[in-house]
Image: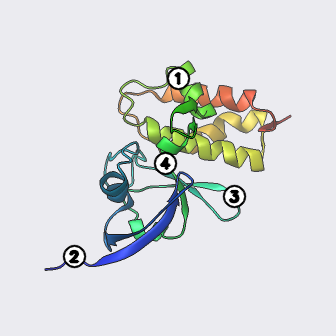
Amino acid sequence: MTIAMKPLSLTINDKPVGPINVPETMMMQDFLFEYLDLTGSRMGCGQGICHACTVVLEKPDGSLEEMRTCITGAHWFAGRKVRTVEGQAKRDASGTITALSPVQQAFIEHFSFQCGYCTPGFVTGATVLLDQLKRNPVRREALEQVISEALDRHICRCTGYVRYFEAVRDLVLKTPGLVKA
């Protein structure tokens, strides 16, 4: 039996990738790990429930969306722009991290994680939420509900939810233009 291969080209963390011959049935999670050595997105449940595997999909209009990589085939991402957790921080020309993303920094300041396994998914979820709030600010009285809706789909087995929530709430409140009066 032969595995059917197909060329795949996309942009990951602002760098063109491919064309690379990839099995037609390979999940994006496996492609990231096995072909690109990007191991930040975690394989949690393998069923798309825990969201530890999510990456940011940059849509043509510039808006961001979470995508689960454990249940989405690598070829679905053909021609698209993806940002993994490794692509969140700012880096210099040599690849050295020069600044964490605002979400990553907020999580560190609030010590939002225990084991850290779910953290990449929460970083992705919070990053997408901030992008949505830049486009459509929320009223202050609805903020907690909006954060809960954005983060509730992410599972943390160490019960770090309160700290993740607090970090995101503080970041949203400190970022001008995300909350309207």
Mark toward the start of the polypeptide (3 vs 1): 3
Residue 122, position as x, y percentages in the image? 50, 39
Residue 62, numbered label: 3
In front: 146, or 174?
A: 174
**Figure coloring:** rainbow
Specify few, some or many for label 3: CA neighbours under 10 Å numbering under 14, 14-19, or 20 or more. Answer: few
Type of amino acid under label 2: Ile
What is the distance, in whole Å, between disc 2 and disc 1 at their CAs? 43 Å
What residue is shown at x 30% (from left), y 55% (from top)?
Answer: 34
**Residue under numbered circle 1:** 108
Residue 30, numbered label: none
Type of amino acid under label 4: Thr
Type of amino acid under label 3: Gly
What is the distance, in whole Å, between disc 4 and disc 2 at their CAs? 27 Å
What is the distance, in whole Å, between disc 4 and disc 1 at their CAs? 18 Å
Q: Are marks 3 and 1 in contact (CB under 8 Å)?
A: no
What is the distance, in whole Å, between disc 3 and disc 1 at their CAs? 27 Å
Q: In which quarter of the image is residue 146?
A: top right
What residue is shown at x 39% (from left), y 30% (from top)?
Answer: 116
Specify few, some or many for label 1: CA neighbours under 10 Å numbering under 14, 14-19, or 20 or more. Answer: some
What residue is shown at x 39% (from left), y 47% (from top)?
Answer: 38
Residue 30, position as x, y percentages in the image? 32, 57
**Residue under numbered circle 4:** 84
Residue 3, numbered label: 2
Residue 100, position as x, y percentages in the image? 57, 31
Mark toward the start of the polypeptide (4 vs 1): 4
Mark toward the start of the polypeptide (2 vs 3): 2
